[in-house]
Amino acid sequence: MKPIILGQGRHTYELVSGWGRLPSGVHYGYTHGVCEDRSGCIYIHNQSPHAMMVFDPDGQFVSSWGEEYESGAHGLQLNREDGEEFLYLALTSQNRCVKTTLDGEVVWEVGCPMDSGVYKEPGEFVPTNIAIAPNGDFYVADGYGLSYIHQYNAKVEYLRTWGGKGSAPGKMNCPHGIFVDTRGAQPVLVVADRANVRLQYFDLEGKHLGFVTDELRFPCHFDILEGDLLIPDLYGRVTIFDRNNKLVAHLGDNPGVEKQEGYPNLPHADRVPGKFISPHAAIWDREGNLYVVEWVSDGRVTKLRRTS
């Protein structure tokens, strides 16, 4: 069979067929988050009784845990701290965020930041992703709630809140993804302001810095490698920008897929290899390979091997 190639130039990839096969009796729910640890294992956050699935780099199933997170499994970020690695989970329908070890031991949990003064009740807070700054501060994006960003320090002490729903500078409409962009002279926050179809930049204290609006369809989240920014675009493609946030490539472009009947849960016969349906999170691994997880009820995980 002829290999399926995506991208061009320094971002040329070959589709790896069948990566990440599941053992008998284990099934994905909506696949929402993905990350890689220092050993090269890949973690998939999904809405199933096996809410955190772990695979080795070759795609062999290693373990799973997190049944208690099934209903809320969404955002996933890995962070290295003093030689250890931790996972930060944003749990939407559970209205909370949890930090765990790689095997699921809970380090801390935070719920609705009532100290912010913007919520009448805890259920209004629906976190979608978490970003971690170099000094240990972390930022929670209330993407499915009231569209605020909440900042905490490394001691899990509440610091500040900004944003809220709108389209003016500093306002957001579904800040779905949030990430610390370290490509410039100083780290800054980049937010996937999804329903406004733009990226929005802030300094680490919440001051609005600017927008990126070109070549975006419905941005979800981020990763960074070699000065490039990776953006899963929910409506059928993955986008790569250079360090100046100019387009390098669209991968797996599937224009109009969001208008198909039943989207995103298309019949398997309509799921074309190399064409994305609903990219929700994506990462580069240490070798520059790509992993993309999609918002599909029975899960969809794609590995793209970098060839350039």
Image: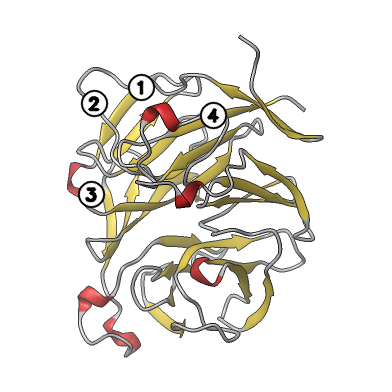
What amino acid type should be assigned to the residue bearing mark 1?
Phe
Q: Quadrant of residue 99?
A: bottom left
Mark 3 in CB contact with mark 1 (< 8 angstroms): no
Q: Which mark is residue 26?
A: 2
**Which type of secondary structure does the marked residue at label 2 adopt?**
loop
Residue at 56% x, 35% y is 275
What amino acid type should be assigned to the residue bearing mark 3?
Tyr
Q: Residues within 10 Å of mark 2 (few under 14, many from 20)?
A: few
Instruction: Specify which label sits upstream in the sequence, 3 or 1.
Output: 1
Residue at 23% x, 40% y is 48
What amino acid type should be assigned to the residue bearing mark 4?
Lys
Q: Quadrant of the N terminus?
A: top right
Q: Quadrant of residue 3?
A: top right
Residue 58 visible, this angle: yes
Q: Position of residue 189 (x, y in %)?
A: 59, 69
What amino acid type should be assigned to the residue bearing mark 2?
Val
**Which type of secondary structure does the marked residue at label 1 adopt?**
strand
Label 4 and label 1: CA atoms lie apart by 14 Å
Which residue carries the number 3 mark? 69
Q: Quadrant of the C terminus?
A: top right
**Which type of secondary structure does the marked residue at label 4 adopt?**
strand
Mark 1 in CB contact with mark 2 (< 8 angstroms): yes
Rendered view: 86 above or below 291: below
Instruction: Specify which label sits upstream in the sequence, 1 or 2.
Output: 2
Q: Which mark is residue 303?
A: 4
Q: Which mark is residue 61?
A: 1
Instruction: Specify which label sits upstream in the sequence, 4 or 2.
Output: 2
**Which type of secondary structure does the marked residue at label 3 adopt?**
helix
Q: Position of residue 178 (x, y in %)?
A: 51, 63
Instruction: Specify which label sits upstream in the sequence, 4 or 3.
Output: 3
